[in-house]
Image: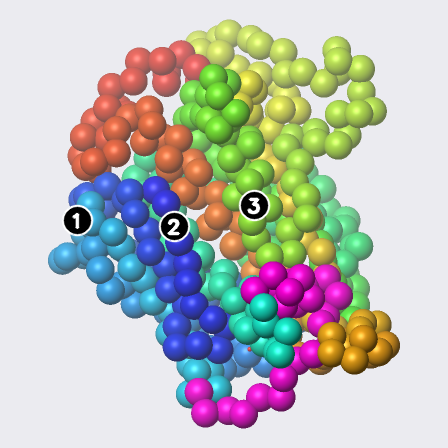
């Protein structure tokens, strides 16, 4: 599966072209649209989210509700296009720190206006990624592979409720307005912080934990650098706007432990091999080991600030303040959906490498015949 997106934030549409989806996959459009809706959710989004109601318009590759094996094109039409198509915009000559503006202007020869850079660099692009990623999630669902994310740090606030129980984490976080384990009092603290950010013109980032479970073992490989599943997941997550880091399992906390307390001891019982811990975050040697795949991604605060930052006017080279653009105050909730969408094709590709890639029925059949799946638990 390969996904390419195209489109500008205020252009006609955000598009995704998806190649490599096998034939015979049933398309659940409601699911895709629900994912798009989730991407638009969360307290702290900007005015644009009031304009858009993102939905997926599948233009190619699906006939009678099923994929044909041909390239799929999805359009998410920008409603805001109507407001922008005849708009005369002032050139942007004061690049925003933290954004692609300055380097993009030089790289692509847009020294007359950063708008040509920011229209594409904008996180609006993630609408197309989520449409495509949701379709890939449907593929994963056919193999009972599931994933969800929850926020473990939002603007420096960590939810006071903690649990290791995945069912509990899922239930609480997926029903929380902040997609976290926060108590009502945590929700209130965070609401106040976001309101303060709105008032004072600053932005907020956070940390998102993603859990992929159930997930079969043996996805990925230690054979080559490209096949290592953790490396592929990291690459996909780091390709998302504003994501600056990722850690698997114990992650950076590995540094504080002796090796004897940092590996997941192996046991064998009635249901095959099992572990009592999951420090590895479900991946050993670049391969899934059957335990939940767990990783955390950090999102920096959105660089567009309503309280402008110091910058330089690219023509006069004089000190200036960065341009104020309508934006979100915080989009950590949205990022959690985007992360899942970015990772879904990585998992799907690893699965198809093992079980085939042409036709759903044949892939499902090869999957159900794999004898080692039982042993590995
Ligand atoms: C976004 C739409 C954009 C931004 C945001 C993401 O809408 P507009 O530019 O029209 O306000 O709100 O983009 C950014 C945060 C960014 O840094 O570019 C969306 O649909 O997610």
Rendered position, 68 above or below 219: below
Mark 2 or 3, closer to the camera: 2
Q: Which mark is residue 237?
A: 3
Q: Earlier in the sequence, mark 1 or mark 3?
A: 1
| Residue annotated with mark 2 | 3
308 relative position to 127: left or right: right
Q: Is residue 114 above or below residue 22?
A: below
Residue 87 is situated, as x and y percent measured from the top left of the image, at 51, 91
Disc 2 + disc 3, Cβ < 8 Å: no
Quadrant where the N terminus lies?
A: top left
43 or 239: nearer the viewer? 239
Magenta span main SS? loop
| Label 2, residues with CA under 10 Å away: few <14, some 14-19, many ≥20 | some
Dot 3 alpha-carbon crowd within 10 angstroms: few under 14, some 14 to 19, many 20 or more: many
Local SS, label 2: strand
Quadrant for residue 259, please give it.
top right
Quarter of the rendering occupied by the C terminus: top left
Q: Residue furthest top?
A: 268
- Spatial CA span between label 2 and label 1: 17 Å
Q: Picture coordinates of residue 116 (x, y %)?
A: 55, 73
Question: In the rendered image, which residue does mark 1 sit on?
Answer: 68
Q: Position of residue 314 (x, y in %)?
A: 74, 75
Foreground of the two, 373 or 251: 251
Q: What residue is shown at x 43% (from left), y 83% (from top)? A: 81
> In the image, is the residue at mark 2 within 8 Å of ligand 1 by its beta carbon?
no
The answer to whether residue 200 is above or below residue 229 is below
Is 285 located above or below residue 152 in the figure?
Answer: above
The magenta-colored residue range is 85-108
Helix, strand or loop under label 1: loop
Q: CA distance from mark 2 to mark 3?
A: 14 Å
Q: Label 1 vs label 3: CA separation?
A: 28 Å
């Amino acid at each position: 599966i390969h996904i390419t997106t195209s489109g500008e934030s205020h252009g006609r549409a955000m598009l995704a072209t998806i190649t490599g989806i096998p034939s015979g996959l049933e398309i659940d459009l409601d699911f895709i649209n629900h994912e798009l809706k989730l991407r638009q959710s969360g307290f702290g989004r900007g005015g644009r989210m009031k304009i858009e109601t993102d939905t997926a318009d599948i233009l190619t590759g699906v006939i009678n509700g099923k994929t044909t094996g041909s390239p799929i094109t999805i359009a998410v039409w920008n409603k805001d296009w109507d407001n922008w198509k005849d708009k005369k915009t002032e050139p942007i000559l004061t690049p925003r720190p933290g954004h692609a503006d300055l380097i993009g202007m030089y790289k692509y020869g847009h020294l007359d206006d950063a708008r040509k850079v920011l229209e594409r660099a904008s996180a609006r692009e993630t609408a197309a990624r989520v449409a495509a990623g949701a379709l890939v999630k449907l593929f994963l669902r056919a193999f009972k592979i599931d994933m969800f994310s929850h926020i473990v740090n939002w603007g420096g606030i960590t939810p006071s409720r903690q649990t290791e129980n995945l069912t509990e984490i899922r239930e609480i976080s997926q029903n929380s307005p902040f997609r976290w384990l926060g108590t009502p009092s945590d929700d209130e603290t965070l609401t106040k912080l976001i309101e303060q950010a709105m008032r004072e013109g600053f932005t907020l980032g956070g940390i998102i934990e993603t859990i992929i479970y159930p997930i079969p073992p043996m996805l990925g490989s230690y054979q080559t650098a490209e096949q290592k599943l953790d490396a592929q997941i990291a690459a996909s997550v780091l390709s998302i706007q504003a994501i600056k880091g990722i850690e698997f399992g114990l992650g950076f906390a590995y540094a504080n432990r002796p090796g004897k307390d940092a590996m997941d001891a192996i046991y064998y019982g009635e249901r095959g091999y099992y572990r009592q811990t999951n420090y590895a975050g479900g991946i050993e040697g670049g391969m899934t080991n059957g335990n939940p795949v767990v990783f955390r991604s950090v999102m920096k605060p959105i660089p567009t600030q309503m309280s402008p930052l110091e910058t330089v006017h690219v023509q006069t080279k004089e000190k200036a303040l960065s341009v104020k653009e309508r934006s979100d105050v915080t989009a950590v909730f949205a990022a959690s959906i985007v992360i899942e969408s970015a990772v879904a094709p990585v998992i799907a590709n690893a699965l198809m490498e093992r079980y085939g890639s042409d036709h759903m029925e044949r892939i499902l059949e090869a999957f159900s015949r794999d004898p080692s799946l039982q042993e590995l638990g």
